[in-house]
Image (spheres, rainbow, N blue to C red):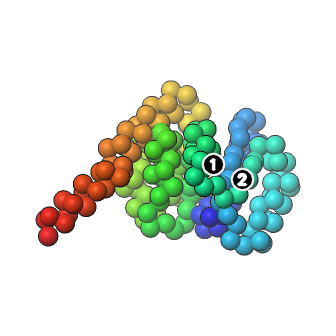
Amino acid sequence: NMQESKGWFKVLEASKILHDSGIEFECHFVGKWSRRKDEKRFYNYVEEHNLSKIVNYHGQLLNWEKNDILSKTDILIYPTEYDAFGRVIIEAMEYGIVTISNNEGTIPSIIKHGITGYVLDNNTATEIYKYIIRLLDDSLRYNMCISSRERFLEKFTLETYRNDFIDIFHEN
């Protein structure tokens, strides 16, 4: 969902910093607006800072549409201010996507900092920007993508969850 507490505005601010630095990129936002006021703020910011050629909003994507955009994604940026689990991160890891996310809930136990992605200390646009700059190194990003996919296969497949659940059930 496109709620400010999920970090969309921080990603917009990081996009502005990248754009002002002369870095070429595209940024894609996916999710359903929960408030019209936020949607208007999003588009006003994009227009005010000349980001319309690099910032794209797709709305809520499900099934094959979501899978399609994930298959084309290099970096997931999810600077949430609250999230108990971070399912979107696991979905990204399934596609071998490097993730930048906040130190919130179980997120630090999902992302291996510096290996499968980065866990933000301060959760600011500037910190997001600094990690994106690191990930412009194709070799580093490639290795982290491989590690992200391997971690998904090792820890987060449905079979792994099922087996872990059965083990817990048998222990009790």
Residue reaching furthest front? 64
Task: Give how far across and how far down residue 170 sits, in percent.
Answer: 14, 64
Residue reaching furthest left? 171
Task: Give how far across and how far down residue 91 sits, in percent.
Answer: 48, 50
Q: Which mark is residue 58?
A: 2
Mark yes or no: residue 4 visible. Answer: no
Mark yes or no: residue 170 visible. Answer: yes
The residue that label 1 is drawn on is 65
Task: Give how far across and how far down residue 41 sits, in percent.
Answer: 79, 65
Is the residue 11 above or below the residue 40 in the image?
above
Q: Give the residue drawn at x 76%, y 65%.
A: 39
Label 1 and label 2: CA atoms lie apart by: 10 Å
Amino acid at circle 2: His
Task: Give how far across and how far down residue 134 sits, in percent.
Answer: 55, 37
Q: Secondary structure at mark 1?
A: helix
Closer to us: 123 or 88 = 88
Q: Quadrant of the C terminus?
A: bottom left
Residues under numbered marks 1 and 2 in contact, where contact means CB atoms less than 8 Å apart: yes
Instruction: Classify residue 64 as left or right of residue 153.
Output: right
- Which is in the foreground here, disc 1 or disc 2? 1
Instruction: Classify residue 141 as left or right of residue 8.
Output: left
